Amino acid sequence: MGHERSSGLLPVRSLGGCGITVPAIGIGCWAIGGADENLGLPMGWSSGSDEAAALAGLEAAWELGARLFDTADVYGHGRSERLIGRLVAQVPRNEIVLSSKVGYFAGTAGHGFDPRHMRRQLEQTLDNLGTGHLDIYSLHHAEFGPGDRWLGPAVEAMRSFREEGHIRAIGMRGPHRFALDRLSTAPGLRGDKIARFRAVFQAVQPDVLGVRDNLLTPGERSAGIFAFAEAHDCGVLINKPLAQGLLTGTHDPDKPRAFGFGDHRSRKRWFIPPAVRIINEGLAELRAVVGPEPGELIRIALWSCLDRYRHAAVLAGFTSARQVRTNLTCLGECPAPGLLTEARMIMARVQAQLDDSGEVFLDEQAGMAQ
């Protein structure tokens, strides 16, 4: 992979053919939306409700060279956007890259992708952020109603927003499942999410993809989506590079964290002690290779994502300024290829154990029985 230009401590990445250039680590702002619910499910972070900590983290990110801030209308139902807006008011708009999403919050509309609702949400997002345009605006999921009724209208709306100058680039999710599918559809009936992604991609023709990738993602899945992005000259924003904190080594299975109301982690099996123990055993093996410093685990985790594709940036979330500082100062030079390969092999064995022991969400089997 070629060398990137440097912006302070961070290498710089171009997001494919859309012309947007960003430091390689962006700031994911889901957690600072705080505790929340949507579609009858917990979808926030109970640990992200401290407004002062969120603002301190955003300011620290800017001071350390971060310029990409990613959010969504549903993150705290506008709270995350409004917090970022307070940073936007203090910095040059042409130096900050703002990304948001639409679709998971329908409000009183019949569907989240009704174009009239999308336009109202975009206007509210711009108001929340205190800006006249977004750099990237993404379709947050791929559920467009019966017979994909809203797919064509949603794509037309996004293109209109771009033509009108309200957004610079159109984004969409990589292969994934709509939040309610796991509760309402048995595993054998859910369909091929890769085929679904390709069909929606063909209709949307996005500039940027949002892709989940980390050391616990199956390697063949990662290779496939990044090869696809390169073939279509798409930029990629990689989310969950630290597996929502599980790859940082800060979770203790003997002292399990209590997730409060509105915290999505309360549904996820990987956060319960047996799974955390499996992950930590893998991290101990990884520490024996990279060293004991906590920042080294994070460095390897981030580079394992960044090394996948030269037109990708990672989105590292936070709930404190301390986390932001660690994430933005630990990166350094890209590790040797052999070290990344070894790290991936170690954590691939962990991922296989996790997948063998059950579904990702604790309530999936209960949902099937309802």
Image (cartoon, rainbow, N blue to C red):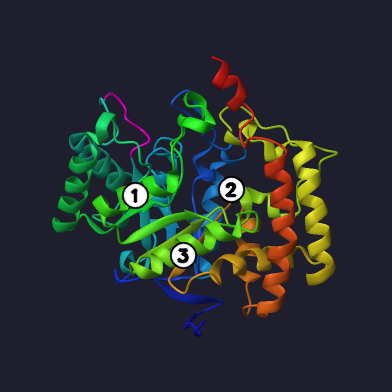
Image quadrant in which the C terminus is located: top right
Comes first in the chain, label 1 or label 3: 1
Q: Which residues are magenta?
A: 103-108
**Residue 185 x %, y %:** 47, 27
Comes first in the chain, label 2 or label 1: 2
Identify the image quadrant of residue 257.
Answer: top right
Given contact means CB atoms under 8 Å apart, are the residues at marks 2 and 1 in contact? no
**Residue 6 x %, y %:** 50, 82
Residue 295 in view: no
- Tell me the residue that label 3 is attached to: 226
Identify the image quadrant of residue 303.
Answer: bottom right
Relative placement, left or right, of 203 versus 353 is left
**Residue 254 x %, y %:** 85, 39
Foreground disc of the pair 2, 3: 3
- The mark found on residue 2 in the picture is none
- Residue 303 part of the magenta-drawn span: no
Comes first in the chain, label 2 or label 3: 2
Report the Cα–Cα distance between label 2 and label 1: 18 Å
Foreground disc of the pair 1, 3: 3
Relative placement, left or right, of 7 versus 94 is right
Residue 153 in view: yes
Identity, as a three-letter code, of the amino acid under mark 2: Ala
Relative placement, left or right, of 146 versus 40 is left
Q: Residues within 10 Å of mark 2 (few under 14, many from 20)?
A: some
